[in-house]
């Protein structure tokens, strides 16, 4: 059977490789001249920078990623996050504050004032009846506005760079949404949920103890290995401009040439897929853009030990947050301190007007204000990730179901549909 996979990001590469293992004749078609999609690693002197995803969670769908790592023989390339990365911070009321890492902190940390009482009351808050609602509406209803604006808002910013006032609870946090619907509350749902015990290898079990993992030479290690395994099955710099098909087969127009396949997998953004099939672009789909400002400092240990910090939108700051790369994965750096500052997202509407120099200026001024870092970086790498992060707004799930029903001859995979994380993309395509 001849199968075409459109898109050579992590989703397309993973699915193509799994099909090839099963004996299918696979052709991956990618309009860019490089494979890997948003996963991009760059080495600048002593510093390793990620322009896209920088790590994966080891639990949940992370088990699928770790199984893929095993199948590709990359176990020796895996590194786990330093224990210090368990310390996470928020920029609240003008200063960095460490988020409590355990139950005791709920009662002893000043920043958690009122939270234990809100969690206790949550047990008796009636379950919602709407088919969907925004993340802001859900958590405000269940835990109050203070908790939502101080903790949920920055958490979602760190994942989606989005606005909780528009993002769909059902699509973005489906497990919590179902806990409320099925158990009546989040607290009851957490206690009543039955965690599936899957059989995993000693390698997977060991990595899962650490929480986060990456690779010695960065995330591109994974996509590069998939490209090697696919060998000559990838066509780079080739644009698909049209898809036509039915139950008997599918045709693709690629750079003016029509190619026939038994099956087609579209691992591209939903708006791109809509254009290829001649469908009107769904209004419920939107993408957030970001500037990723990577900074390398000759000075060592200029941050506290920890993962980094996020900034709630109510603080009205210039950045979304900062990751302390040297503290999370010190194995990747040869010296000094590597940081990543994130700018943009749905909270910063003027993002498109910012140039590289302005982004660097905002990053440095924010680090000076938030962490008293006055040193000039030795190396700066700025990457504009435009339309990079799908925003699952209200109605997203219905849109995806409708599109899949309308085009049964296409298999639709990727971050536009069932989860934006690397782990989600791999779990749905491997």
Image (spheres, rainbow, N blue to C red):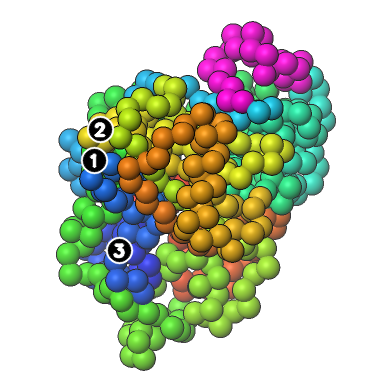
Q: Was residue 96 drawn as part of the magenta stretch in this picture?
A: yes
x and y percent of residue 360 in the render? Answer: 47, 50
Q: Secondary structure at mark 3?
A: loop
Q: Position of residue 333 (x, y in %)?
A: 26, 35
Residue 335: image tag: 2
| Magenta range | 95-119
The residue positioned 80% from the left and 42% from the top of the image is 129
Residue 39 position (above or below residue 31): above
Determine whether label 1 and label 3 are within 8 Å by CB.
no
Left or right side of 144 for 104:
left
Confirm or deny contact between disc 2 and disc 1 (CB under 8 A).
yes
In the rendered image, which residue does mark 3 sit on?
35
Q: Is residue 376 visible?
A: yes
Q: Which residue is mark 1?
A: 46
Q: Is residue 134 magenta?
A: no
Left or right placement of residue 341 versus residue 44 in this view? right
Quadrant where the N terminus sits is bottom left
* Element at label 2: loop
Q: CA distance from mark 2 to mark 3?
A: 29 Å
> Which is more foreground, mark 2 or mark 3?
2
């Amino acid at each position: 059977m001849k199968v075409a996979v459109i898109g050579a990001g992590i989703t397309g590469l993973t699915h193509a490789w799994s099909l090839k293992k099963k004996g299918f004749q696979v052709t991956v078609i990618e309009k860019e001249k490089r494979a890997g999609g948003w996963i991009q690693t760059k080495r600048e002197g002593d510093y390793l920078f990620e322009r896209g995803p920088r790590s994966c969670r080891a639990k949940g769908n992370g088990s699928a990623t770790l199984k893929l790592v095993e199948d590709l023989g990359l176990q020796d390339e895996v590194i786990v996050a330093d224990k210090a990365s368990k310390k996470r911070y928020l920029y609240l009321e003008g200063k960095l504050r460490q988020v409590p890492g355990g139950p005791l902190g709920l009662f002893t940390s000043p920043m958690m004032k009122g939270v234990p009482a809100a969690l206790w009351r949550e047990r008796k808050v009636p379950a919602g009846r709407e088919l969907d609602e925004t993340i802001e509406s859900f958590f405000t209803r269940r835990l109050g506005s203070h908790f939502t604006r101080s903790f949920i808002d920055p958490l979602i910013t760190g994942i989606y760079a989005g606005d909780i006032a528009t993002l769909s609870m059902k699509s973005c946090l489906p497990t919590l949404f179902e806990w409320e619907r099925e158990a009546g509350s989040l607290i009851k749902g957490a206690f009543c949920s039955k965690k599936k015990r899957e059989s995993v290898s000693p390698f997977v079990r060991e990595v899962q103890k650490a929480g986060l993992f990456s690779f010695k030479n960065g995330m591109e290690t994974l996509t590069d290995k998939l490209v090697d395994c696919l060998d000559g099955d990838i066509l780079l710099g080739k644009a698909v401009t049209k898809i036509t098909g039915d139950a008997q087969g599918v045709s693709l127009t690629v750079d003016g040439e029509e190619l026939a396949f038994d099956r087609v997998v579209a691992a591209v953004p939903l708006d791109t897929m809509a254009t290829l099939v001649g469908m009107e672009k769904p209004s419920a789909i939107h993408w957030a853009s970001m500037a990723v400002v990577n900074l390398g400092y000759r000075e060592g240990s200029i941050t506290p030990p920890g993962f980094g910090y996020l900034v709630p939108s109510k603080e009205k700051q210039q950045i979304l947050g900062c990751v302390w790369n040297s503290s999370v994965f010190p194995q990747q750096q040869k010296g000094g301190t590597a940081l990543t500052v994130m700018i943009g997202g749905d909270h910063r509407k003027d993002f498109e007007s910012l140039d590289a120099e302005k982004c660097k200026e905002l990053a440095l001024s924010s680090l000076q204000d938030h962490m008293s870092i006055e040193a000039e970086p030795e190396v700066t790498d700025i990457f504009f990730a435009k339309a990079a992060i799908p925003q699952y707004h209200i109605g997203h799930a219905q849109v995806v179901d409708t599109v899949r029903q309308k085009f049964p001859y296409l298999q639709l995979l990727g971050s536009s549909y069932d989860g934006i994380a690397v782990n989600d993309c791999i779990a749905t395509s491997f």
